[in-house]
């Protein structure tokens, strides 16, 4: 598996290509900025290696504890952390849920201390309206997250495949991921006949 420094270099070297392709495809500087920003964030702080004590994890500083339950729930390099789309989606849902819980707690504390009444119906309507108005921007940001995460996962998979090829040749690439069939075992072991009784 490539080192954290190698992953960082891949993210930096890939940024001009991601930015150029996005700008040519969308012809929008705003969308390009969101995709590029999401790509950098996905590559440096929001990638698949948040499931271990990694460089990405350490970059969260004093907030890194947020990801401890995430790490304990997932096996490293599992499909849920490193898989295409599902890995990024799970991290977005995880972080969004955490932020929503924190926001609700802040609202409750403000309501108690400041004697302020919050209309939760209005709050959810504002959130829903914001999502419906800016769904394109949210999608562009998600695409950036996913591209940053996939640059990481693809380099992991490529490196692993290269090492298997070095050790086993083409056979290492062909047999990877195949489940070895186990020979069926019988419940009763055959009893050998003592010598002299065999016919």
Image (cartoon, rainbow, N blue to C red):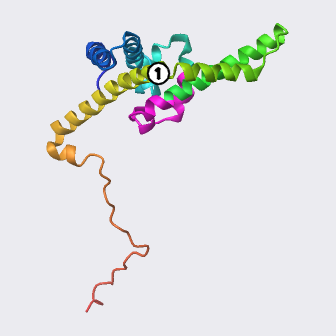
Q: What range is drawn magenta here?
A: 67-90
Residue at image position (29%, 24%) is 2
Q: Which residue is mark 1?
A: 136
Residue at image position (60%, 26%) is 97
Q: Magenta: predominant secondary structure element?
A: helix
Q: For the N terminus, give its image quadrant.
A: top left
Q: Is residue 45 magenta?
A: no
The front one of 189 and 132 is 132
Residue at image position (68%, 23%) is 124
Name the quadrant containing residue 185: bottom left
Residue 57's x, y, as percent?
46, 19
Q: Relative to residue 166, is residue 178 drawn left or right?
A: right
Q: Is residue 109 above or below residue 68?
A: above
Name the quadrant containing residue 56: top left
Name the quadrant containing residue 165: top left
Q: For the C terminus, give its image quadrant.
A: bottom left
Q: Is residue 75 magenta?
A: yes
Taking the view exactly as shown, the residue that stands out farthest to the right is: 115
Residue 135's x, y, as percent?
51, 23
Q: Relative to residue 115, is residue 186 drawn left or right?
A: left
Taking the view exactly as shown, the residue that stands out farthest to the top is: 114
Residue 62's x, y, as percent?
55, 11
The front one of 164 and 36 is 36
The front one of 67 and 114 is 114
């Amino acid at each position: 598996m490539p080192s954290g420094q190698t992953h960082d270099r891949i993210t930096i070297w890939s940024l001009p290509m991601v930015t150029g392709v996005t700008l040519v495809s969308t012809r929008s500087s705003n969308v390009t900025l969101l995709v590029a920003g999401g790509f950098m964030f996905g590559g440096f702080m929001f990638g698949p290696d948040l499931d271990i004590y990694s460089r990405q994890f350490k970059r969260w500083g004093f907030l890194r504890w947020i990801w401890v339950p995430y790490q304990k729930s997932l096996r490293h390099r599992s499909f849920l952390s490193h898989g295409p789309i599902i890995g990024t989606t799970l991290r977005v849902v995880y972080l969004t849920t955490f932020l929503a819980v924190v926001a609700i707690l802040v609202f409750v504390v403000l309501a108690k201390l400041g004697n302020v009444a919050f209309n939760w119906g209005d709050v959810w309507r504002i959130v829903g309206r914001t999502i419906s108005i800016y769904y394109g921007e949210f999608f562009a940001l998600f695409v950036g997250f996913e591209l940053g995460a996939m640059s990481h996962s693809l380099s992991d998979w490529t490196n692993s495949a290269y090492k298997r090829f070095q050790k086993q040749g083409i056979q290492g690439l062909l047999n990877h991921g195949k489940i070895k069939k186990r020979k069926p075992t019988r419940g009763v072991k055959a009893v050998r006949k003592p010598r002299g009784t065999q016919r």
